Image (cartoon, rainbow, N blue to C red):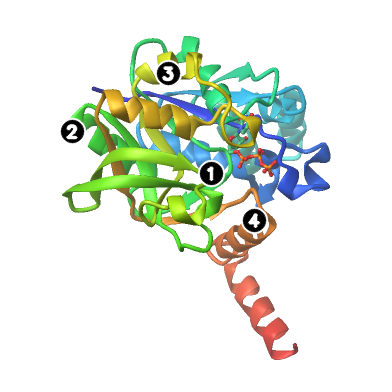
Amino acid sequence: MKIKKAVIPAAGLGTRMLPATKTIPKEMLPVVDKPSIQYIIEEAVASGIEDILIVTNRAKSAMDDYFDYHPELEESLKRAGKVNEIETVRRTADLANIFYVRQKETKGLGHAIWRAKHFVGDEPFAVLLGDDIMVSETPVMRQLIDLAEEYSCSVVGVQRVSREVIGKYCTLGVKPVKERCYDVTELIEKPRPEQVISDFAILGRYVLTPAIFDVLEDLPAGYGGEIQLTDGLNALCQNERMLACDFEGKRYDTGNLRGYMEVTIDMALEHPEIKDWMKDFLRSKIENS
Ligand code: UTP
């Protein structure tokens, strides 16, 4: 089983990042000098993905434009002799084969994934949530794909989260298979404290078999009146094997203000052009506060 296609659901309303996301898609908010979705596409490409479908909506056409050529801008950069800048803007359009489909109504993550059915066809595929930036030695999606290819089954990316916050995610029943790898037996979206089965939660990365589409087709609305991917995964893992990969790496949730600020500062501290300045700036701020 080879995984060459990925789906990035990016049709959410981004209400936690208002007012910026009133007109700017949250996936286009810059993290230092790149929009956050570019980090996600770069992770997919570094994991061996060739074709990417972004699930968008009518307010998100800035994404299509970003991953396209911009001849007028390139011409102007050429006239100004800005060779490096031409390469930088060209590269965004050449990262991968990027396709788009619209989710016409914001009916939930499960519904957004279901919109990818025709693009995916009859092969397993990767899912990377548009909100979650990962920093790791081996790309997080590659870690999941390695397991999916070894065991020929679906894999969800998990990490342990504290009991205080697990209610914002989902909880999973798991049985150990080998180091950092578990069989998934059950999933519950946004669990109440008495429903928490383990400390593991899914954090924005999945490899799914196309059987998920049959499940999503008839799935009733779940938590919050939305069609929940977690409910679909719970049904899927009753019918076929599903593994949880306790991935190595740091995950940032850019969909909320703290996560967004955290990733922005961390990335600035790694950026070759500004990292020294950034360190001095932060140091002086702390000393003077
Ligand atoms: P979130 O709930 O984190 O995103 O969905 P949101 O709805 O944009 O956020 P808030 O709560 O209003 O701030 C997880 C992922 O699922 C996508 C989102 O774009 C995000 O990547 N999603 C969610 C869809 O594509 N469609 C939906 O109907 C819902």
Q: Earlier in the sequence, mark 1 or mark 4?
A: 1
Rendering coords of residue 25 (x, y %):
72, 37
Rendering coords of residue 256 (x, y %):
66, 53
Residue at horizontal 35 percent and vertical 11 percent from the top = 122
Q: Earlier in the sequence, mark 4 or mark 2?
A: 2
Rendering coords of residue 65 (x, y %):
70, 26
Residue at horizontal 79 percent and vertical 47 percent from the top = 18
Mark carried by residue 217? none
Can you tell which of label 1 and label 3 is closer to the viewer?
A: 3
Can you tell which of label 4 and label 3 is closer to the viewer?
A: 3
Mark carried by residue 260? 4
Element type at mark 2: helix
Element type at mark 1: helix
- The residue that mark 3 highlights is 215
Residue 29 placement, left or right of 108: right
Indicate the quadrant where residue 207 lies.
top left
Residue type marked 2: Glu
Measure how far apart labels 4 and 3 are at the Cα level: 33 Å
- The residue that mark 2 highlights is 150
- The residue that mark 1 highlights is 39
Q: Earlier in the sequence, mark 1 or mark 2?
A: 1
Residue type marked 3: Val
Residue 115 placement, left or right of 154: right
Q: Please tell me which residue lies in front, 235 or 28.
A: 235
Taking the image as drawn, is residue 210 in sight?
Answer: no
Q: State if disc 3 and disc 4 touch (CB < 8 Å).
A: no
